[in-house]
Amino acid sequence: MSAEDLEKYETEMELQLYKEYRDIVGQFTYVVETERRFYLANVVDVQVRNSDSEVYFEVAMSDAWVWDMYRPARFVKNVRVITFKDVNVEELDKPDLRLPESGPFGG
């Protein structure tokens, strides 16, 4: 496999991963970013820990999806991450009512 073929394959995998993300993001409540991974999850618990005067974070997630194109299964029941780096947790906006794009109420 040439370098060009490998680059094309990785680009196609990244596009496929983005499409999967776009299709499932509405099923999740939180976006979690660590230094190594990007997650979608419905339950997130971040605990600040101290060890030998160093602070680290323990992040537990349930009902999660992992942004990783090399994983064969991206849906994960439980995830536990230990990190000394920043953790970003954002709650996704969930509109209460979505009208169909076509039909009697859509355009």
Image (tube, rainbow, N blue to C red):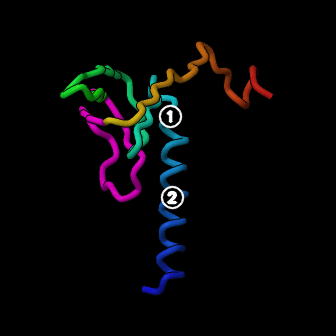
Q: Is residue 62 visible?
A: no
Indicate whether 56 appears above or below 23.
Answer: above
Q: Is residue 3 visible?
A: yes
72 horizontally vs 7: left or right? left
Name the residue at the left extreme.
52
Query: Does 93 lie within the magenta span?
Result: no
Q: Please report the residue visible at 28 percent of the width from the left and 38 percent of the height from the top.
A: 76
Helix, strand, or loop for circle 2? helix
Residue situated in front as seen by the camera: 38 or 28: 38
Q: Main secondary structure of the magenta part?
A: strand
How many numbered circles are shown?
2
Q: Please report the residue visible at 42 percent of the width from the left and 86 percent of the height from the top.
A: 1
Contact between marks 2 and 1 (CB within 8 A): the answer is: no
Helix, strand, or loop for circle 1? helix
Name the residue at the top extreme.
96
98 horizontally vs 4: left or right? right
Q: Position of residue 30 (x, y in %)?
A: 45, 25
Residue 95's disc is none
What kind of residue is marked 2? Glu
Q: Please report the residue visible at 59 percent of the width from the left and 13 percent of the height from the top.
A: 96
Q: Please report the residue visible at 38 percent of the width from the left and 46 percent of the height from the top.
A: 36
Name the residue at the bottom extreme.
2
Quarter of the image for residue 72 reads bottom left
Q: Position of residue 89 (x, y in %)?
A: 45, 26
Task: Give the mark nearer the N terminus: 2 vs 1.
Answer: 2
Residues in magenta, as a range: 60-83
15 horizontally vs 69: left or right? right
What kind of residue is marked 1? Val
Q: Quadrant of the C terminus?
A: top right
User: Residue beneath label 2, please?
Assistant: 14
Indicate whether 96 appears above or below 78.
Answer: above
Residue 25's disc is 1
